[in-house]
Amino acid sequence: MSKLNQDQAPILEALRDFKKMRVVPFDVPGHKRGRGNKELLDFLGEKCLTADVNSMKPLDNLCHPVSVIRKAEELAADAFGAAHAFFMVNGTTQSVQSMILSVCKSGDKIIMPRNVHRSAINALILSGATPVYVNPGMNHDIGISLGMSVSDVQKAIDENPDAKAVLVNNPTYYGVCSNLKEIIRIAHEKGILVIADEAHGTHFYFNDRLPASAMSLGADMASVSMHKSGGSLTQSSFLLISDTLSEGYVRQIINLSQTTSGSYLLMSSLDISRRNLALHGQEIFDKVIDYAADAREEINKIGGYYAFSDELINGDDVFDFDITKLSVHTRDIGLAGIEVYDLLRDEYDIQIEFGDIGNILAYLSVGDRRQDIERLVSALSEIKRRYEKDKSGMLSQEYINPEVVMTPKKAFYAEKVSLPIEESKGRVCSEFVMCYPPGIPILAPGERITGDILDYISYAKEKGCFLTGTEDSYTERINVIK
């Protein structure tokens, strides 16, 4: 329950007051409220560009907030049930990396699922921390990776009692939640911190029909991607901490890599969106939940598709499920998810979040309308009628257990050689290979390249997945340890 008046938006109010002052700008940015770049002004508008200002006394400073940003942080912490909230303007990527850098130094161990976002493994390259990977569960029928089982986390803790932290996805991209409450309990018993990647879990904090949020269960830190389901501008995020961590130290870590020119467009969008969710989140996400349920019902009536939901819950590696997620298995109509993704965009002018080898995800959030969802369902029905084919020969595996040979940092900075990817079997990779989205690495630095992985990459290319991470932008060559 909020202790503060959530009807306030201090950054927004300060910007409004600042605009009334009619200050003559002899500072940056150089467009000078848009006057210096007419094309930009015409495209974005005066309201936007007059709010694109520099840090100054009336507007506070993101690197060391003492007034309006500080007040906005306190309101956000209160809304999310955290001891402190940091405004992040370099995306949730930087928020995840700041979490890991705050709890791990070079050589420290961190327990994490291997189906993490690339930002987490990038943080290992930056910090020199050693990952202890827990392979997620698998649902082989729909070809998705799940959460971590408690027994696997317990085993990792027993074998690595010196680990500094456990990282948990809450939820995964598909909406799957691990038993975070129990993971926190067993980790804290051993003095190990628990940090949560909640890039896709903003709404958990504002609706009681959804899975529990990390901070409500006692996590030490959480990265919340407010721009995804929370309605703020792209690249804006919150980093939440409990009172087990030093606010000052975490801010020092953030300031190692966050810009000193924090965007007031991003910060005000966080401030406004936090207020909106704090005041109206229950009703907003009630509507999203109902839209998703109706869409699943209609999609499953089409036949061939499987829009999956909380029926997957098994009490372990699917401990809970985010019922706002509209995840649809497509392989039974003979089409890879990425093929349906491309057809929806190219033939029906519908842009969904992602398609992979076997599934698509349509992201439902605060701004969706019923008529748009009906259009999506109709398009999926027509795609089945026009494009369905035999599914034999389709690849089903979404996750391949990695063979980790060395730490990501050691592999990334090692002497390397570039090989044609088809000639790299058996070598140790020194870079990433991933489909984006979702940005979960197929290969990460320090992992053995196997025949199964090469088959998967070849299949993903054939089906049209956007492969990224390699120095070679076409992913025809790969860097391996010399």
Image (tube, rainbow, N blue to C red):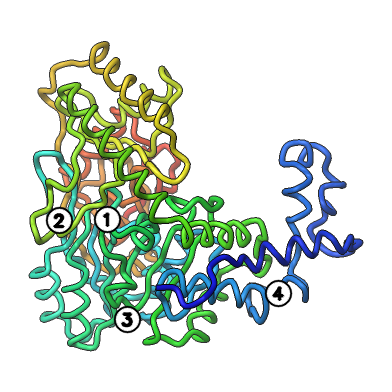
User: Which kind of residue does numbered mark 4 sit on?
Assistant: Asp
Q: Which of marks 1 and 4 is nearer the N terminus?
A: 4
- Quadrant position of the N terminus in the picture: bottom left
The residue under label 1 is 209
Q: Give the residue drawn at x 45%, y 87%.
A: 246
Name the spot of residue 248 as percent of width and height, x first: 52, 86
Q: Who comes first in sequence, dot 2 or dot 4?
A: 4
- The disc, 3 or 1, on the residue closer to the chain's N-terminal end is 3
For disc 4, the marked residue is 60
Would you place residue 221 above or below residue 420 in this image?
below
| Viewer-nearest of discs 1 and 4 | 1
Q: Which of 124 and 173 is in front in this view?
A: 173
Label 3: few (<14), some (14–19) or many (≥20) C-alpha neighbours in 10 Å: few
The numbered disc on residue 318 is 2
Image x and y of residue 403, in percent: 17, 59
225 lies left or right of 193: right
Closest to the observer: 453 or 190? 190
Q: How far apart are marks 2 and 3 (CA)?
A: 31 Å
Which mark's residue is nearer the viewer, 2 or 3? 2
Q: How far apart are marks 3 and 1 (CA)?
A: 41 Å
